[in-house]
Amino acid sequence: MDKGWKIMQFLSDYAETKALSFIVIPGGGPFAEVIKKISEKRAISDDTAHWMAVLAMHQYGLFLAGGEQEIPVAESMEELNNADPLSIVLPYKLLKDDDSLPHTWDVTSDTIAAFIAHKLGEKTFMKLTDVDGILDENGVLIKKIHAKELIDKEQKGCVDAELPKFLLQHDMSCMVVNGNVPERIIDVIEGRETICTKLVSLSED
């Protein structure tokens, strides 16, 4: 089973058990990798590359939704506000309706997830990745870092370059968690200490 499907099934089972709801904003997966290679090799505009990459997220969302356990999808704010216990966002229409993010490779699914969380009135969200969090120059996990500090760092680690700017602008935070260790996802949800990085805005303590 694809590991993305495994995470979706895990979240679905947990949401049902705890009577919670989760909204998943997909990455671009292998589809976005193809778009970036095309962008690097061919003279396509930043606008074209941006919308192709958003459509890559859209496609990967359909892929995740169509696994062994079919999961509902949401394409509008109305659908998101009335979402099932677990829903996957197909972001193309949402971003077309509010085209306020920069059209650059500095903006990936990280900033788009923050953008959608902000539209939903959320102040924090979780980024699932395949590493333990943001690492320092020596490869040591950074447990907590302020957005301004990350903006000033040349290497942003596993988050895109625009994300810390967006968090700072909107006073938000992001928990960067290794999705290959589902127990850590639950630890973050339930407020326990775990292995991850908390990326915060400067107004937070």
Image: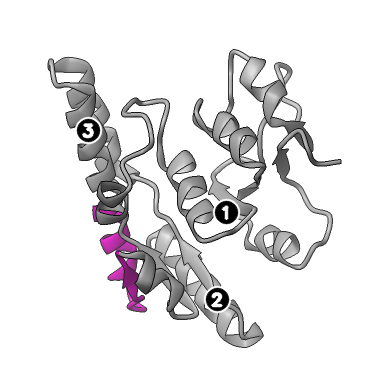
- Residue 158 visible in the snapshot: no
Residue 176 vs residue 42: left or right?
A: right
Q: Residues within 10 Å of mark 3 (few under 14, many from 20)?
A: many
According to the image, label 3 marks what residue? 35
The residues bearing labels 2 and 1 have C-alpha atoms spaced at a distance of: 18 Å
Circle 1 is placed at which residue position?
A: 179
Distance of mark 1 from mark 3, alpha carbons? 24 Å
- The residue to which callout 2 is attached is 21
Color encoding of the figure:
one colour
N-terminal of the two: label 2 or label 3? 2
Q: Callout 1 environment at 10 Å: few (<14), some (14 to 19), or many (20+)?
A: some
Q: Amino acid at mark 2?
A: Ser
Amino acid carrying label 3: it is Ile
Residue at x 17%, y 25% (from the top left corner): 38
- Residue type at mark 1 is Gly
Mark 1 vs mark 3: give the one in front. Answer: 3
* Rendering coords of residue 16 (x, y %): 56, 85
Residue at x-position 64% and y-position 34%: 168
Q: Residues within 10 Å of mark 2 (few under 14, many from 20)?
A: some
From the viewer's side, name the closer residue of 105 and 202: 202
Assign a secondary structure to mark 2: loop
Q: What residue do we see at 27% from left, 51% from top?
A: 97
**Quadrant in which the C terminus appears:** top right
Where the N terminus falls, by quadrant? Answer: bottom left
Circle nearer the N terminus (2, 1): 2
> Are dots 1 and 3 in contact, CB under 8 Å?
no
Which segment is the magenta one?
A: 58-75
Residue 160 screen position, x and y as percent: 49, 30
